[in-house]
């Protein structure tokens, strides 16, 4: 089987920021963890989140609330990144920008998921070796995206539907579109993934809408 340009890119990736974007329940988290298992099986895996989450469901993963304990050559996951680093939260704080500036020196592979990049800090898109991976997004959601993401997402939706029609036995949620090369890939779930379990990592997290 001939490898796509995006497959070769990930196969040889030493560092970078991968942004998995798409509407809810379209397989963003599953794809993120499955890609890590496929391409970087021997790298340490970290879940970066300020909340008290149960990381035991992710075999071999370590939960951290800050970046200072993450060693070089790690894969770092940030689920629903807008909760942690939204554009409104980090606009006057350069901590994110300073951290992203060392991604290449530390050989980090940072994988973030987002339902809407409109609320995400633009530092992610300006960081070193940013790779956008698009899942399906509902047309009503696309209109609220940043203009450059809208263009990519329209192309992504068309490509995802095309592949789904060509391969009707493929799980629609597994299909990804890589904006850099304009190609698609179907990513099989990592063998330990359970939809009702791993896709609800924040089910027990308490979120207050009123700041203290």
Image (cartoon, rainbow, N blue to C red):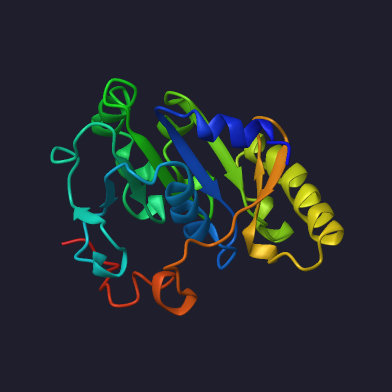
- Of the 4 image quadrants, the one containing the N terminus is top right
Q: Measured from the top left, where is residue 197 in percent x and y?
A: 40, 76
Q: Is residue 3 left or right of residue 25?
A: right
Q: Is residue 27 left or right of residue 61?
A: right
Q: Measured from the top left, where is residue 39 in percent x and y?
A: 47, 42
Q: Residue at x 80, y 54 (%)?
A: 163
User: In the picture shown, does residue 132 fall above or below 25?
Assistant: above
Q: Residue at x 33, y 35 (%)?
A: 91
User: In the picture shown, does residue 93 fall above or below 211?
Assistant: above
User: In the picture shown, does residue 62 fall above or below 14?
Assistant: below
Q: Measured from the top left, where is residue 187 in percent x and y?
A: 60, 54
Q: Quadrant of residue 76?
A: top left
- Of the 4 image quadrants, the one containing the C terminus is bottom left
User: In the picture shown, does residue 22 fall above or below 109?
Assistant: below
Seen from the viewer's position, the closer of residues 160 and 194 is 194
Q: Residue at x 46, y 29 (%)?
A: 13
Question: In this figure, what is the number of numbered marks?
Answer: 0
Q: Measured from the top left, where is residue 44 in percent x and y?
A: 27, 45
Q: Residue at x 28, y 77 (%)?
A: 204
């Amino acid at each position: 089987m001939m490898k796509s340009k995006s497959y070769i890119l990930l196969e040889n990736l030493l560092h970078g920021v991968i942004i998995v974007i798409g509407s809810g329940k379209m397989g963003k988290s599953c794809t993120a963890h499955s890609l890590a298992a496929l391409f970087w099986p021997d790298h340490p895996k970290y879940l970066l989140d300020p909340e008290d989450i149960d990381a035991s469901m992710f075999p071999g993963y370590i939960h951290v609330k800050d970046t200072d304990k993450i060693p070089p050559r790690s894969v770092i996951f940030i689920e629903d990144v807008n909760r942690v680093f939204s554009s409104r939260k980090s606009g006057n704080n350069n901590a994110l920008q300073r951290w992203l500036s060392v991604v290449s020196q530390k050989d980090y592979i940072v994988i973030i998921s987002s339902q809407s990049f409109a609320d995400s800090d633009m530092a992610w898109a300006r960081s070193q070796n940013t790779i956008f991976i698009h899942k399906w997004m509902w047309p009503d959601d696309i209109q609220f995206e940043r203009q450059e993401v809208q263009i990519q997402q329209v192309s992504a939706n068309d490509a995802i539907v095309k592949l789904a029609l060509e391969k009707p036995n493929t799980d629609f949620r597994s299909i990804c579109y890589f904006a850099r090369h304009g190609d698609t890939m179907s990513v099989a779930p990592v063998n330990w993934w359970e939809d009702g379990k791993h896709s609800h990592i924040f089910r027990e997290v308490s979120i207050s809408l009123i700041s203290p």
